[in-house]
């Protein structure tokens, strides 16, 4: 197995608990109850099961306002249209599913808040594909109201960036700040159970050193679930996607940092291997002999005139990190990502000492001038 120092180049450890702006108190924890993993009660599939359960008795009588199409084949946009359409019965049916799902999400959230790792959590950001819909936003808002009605002092809000970009933007917060002094962009990779997305991310560090104005300049998506590639084939395709983005960024005149941040499902070990949680990826990514960061560093040994550094963390962590600039009023906060499963991470903001804060304030003033 490749030594991880070859891929991190002294900039940090894969799956690290201590990052430039936050401490990662926990990630990818798997809570259970008598019925199994709690995440299964608040996932995209869980919502579909709830809606399907409400539809079945109506289908027997021929009174299903959503028609004959299977629940799994009804997209979020169609359900959003039902919420706002003239068919009151269809709207009521979807609202009923939202209410039941919110009850489940509230139950799961309470269990997280009771765990030691999530003690004193002040705010929870909710991301994942489910969030990118009106029904998702309503479910999140309703869950927040349920928790507050029980006296729990925690805010529950949708992640502010599009879920497709949040994981890429979060990779900026894996990199040490000195990288941004000489470079304006990084490469980021967001790996999911169905898709792999790569992007060139602009830090806009000179405008906002806290990275609050960062944006994805260009991205490329590959739906690997359709192609069913081998593990080696997936890595080869990923390397090509990144090389194409490097060419595009250089042609545009960006100063691309010799850094690749990776957002990946599962428990990420310090050496770049994946302990568990990568079962939906093509091939066996949990093998002790498979090291994605090392393979990417070998495939792209240099960016510009410098050796490539690669750093990988859990995908839930990466999505949450995109919110770091906007969570500075909290000390302890978390993220839940609703998708194929329920991703989770809890953070503690690191308070800077006065000397460090004064130094940053001077940088901010200089950047504004």
Image: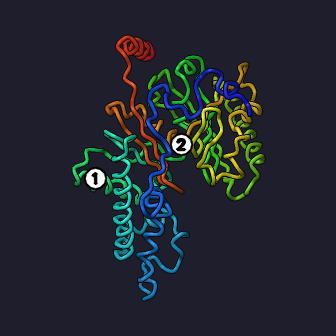
Q: Quadrant of residue 182?
A: top right
Q: Observer-nearest residue: 203 or 271?
A: 271
Q: Position of residue 276 (x, y in %)?
A: 60, 47
Q: Nearer the viewer, mark 2 or mark 1?
A: 1
Quadrant housing the N terminus: top right
Does residue 239 appear left or right of residue 23 in this picture?
Answer: right
Q: For mark 2, give the secondary structure.
A: helix
Query: Residue 188's x, y, as percent?
Result: 61, 36
Q: Nearer the viewer, residue 152 or 366?
A: 152
* Total number of numbered discs in the rendering: 2
- Quarter of the image with the C terminus is top left
Up the image or down, 78 lies above or below 219; here it is below
Q: Which residue appears at 50% of the width and 28% of the height?
A: 19
- Residue on which the image places disc 2: 165
Rendered residue at 50%/39% (across/down): 317
Please indicate whether residue 265 sits to the left or right of residue 337 in the image: right
**In the displayed structure image, the side of residue 320 where residue 111 appears, left or right:** left
> Residue 299 in the image: x percent, y percent?
77, 33
On the question of residue 256 being in view, the answer is no
């Amino acid at each position: 197995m490749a030594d991880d120092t070859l891929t991190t180049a002294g900039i940090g450890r894969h799956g690290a608990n201590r990052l430039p702006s936050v401490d990662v108190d926990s990630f990818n924890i798997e809570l259970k109850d008598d019925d199994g993993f709690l995440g299964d009660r608040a996932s995209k599939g869980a919502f579909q099961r709830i809606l399907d359960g409400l539809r079945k008795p109506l289908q027997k009588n021929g009174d299903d306002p959503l028609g004959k199409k299977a629940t799994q084949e009804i997209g979020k946009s169609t359900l959003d249209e039902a919420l706002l359409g003239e068919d009151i019965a269809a709207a009521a049916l979807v609202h009923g599913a939202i209410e039941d799902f919110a009850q489940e999400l509230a139950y799961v959230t309470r269990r997280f808040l009771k765990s030691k790792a999530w003690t004193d959590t002040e705010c929870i950001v909710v991301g994942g594909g489910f969030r990118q819909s009106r029904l998702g936003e309503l479910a999140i808002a309703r869950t927040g109201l349920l928790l507050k009605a029980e006296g729990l002092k925690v805010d529950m809000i949708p992640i502010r960036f599009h879920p497709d970009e949040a994981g890429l933007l979060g990779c900026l917060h894996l990199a040490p700040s000195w990288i941004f002094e000489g470079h304006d962009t990084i490469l980021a990779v967001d790996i999911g159970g169905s898709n792999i997305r790569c992007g060139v991310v602009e830090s806009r560090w000179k405008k906002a050193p806290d990275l609050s104005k960062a944006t994805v300049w260009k991205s490329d998506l590959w739906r690997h679930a359709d192609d069913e590639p081998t593990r080696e084939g997936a890595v080869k395709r990923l390397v090509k996607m990144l090389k194409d983005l490097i060419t595009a960024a250089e042609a545009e005149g960006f100063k691309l940092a010799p850094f690749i941040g990776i957002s990946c499902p599962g428990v990420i070990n310090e050496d770049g291997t994946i302990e568990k949680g990568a079962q939906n990826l093509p091939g066996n990514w949990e093998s002790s002999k498979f090291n994605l960061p090392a393979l990417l560093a070998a495939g792209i040994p240099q960016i510009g005139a410098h050796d490539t550094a690669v750093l990988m963390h859990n995908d839930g962590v990466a999505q949450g990190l995109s919110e770091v600039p906007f969570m500075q009023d909290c000390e302890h906060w978390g993220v839940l990502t609703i998708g194929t499963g329920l991703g989770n991470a809890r953070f503690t903001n690191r308070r800077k000492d006065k000397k460090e804060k004064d130094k940053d304030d001077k940088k901010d003033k200089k950047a504004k001038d």
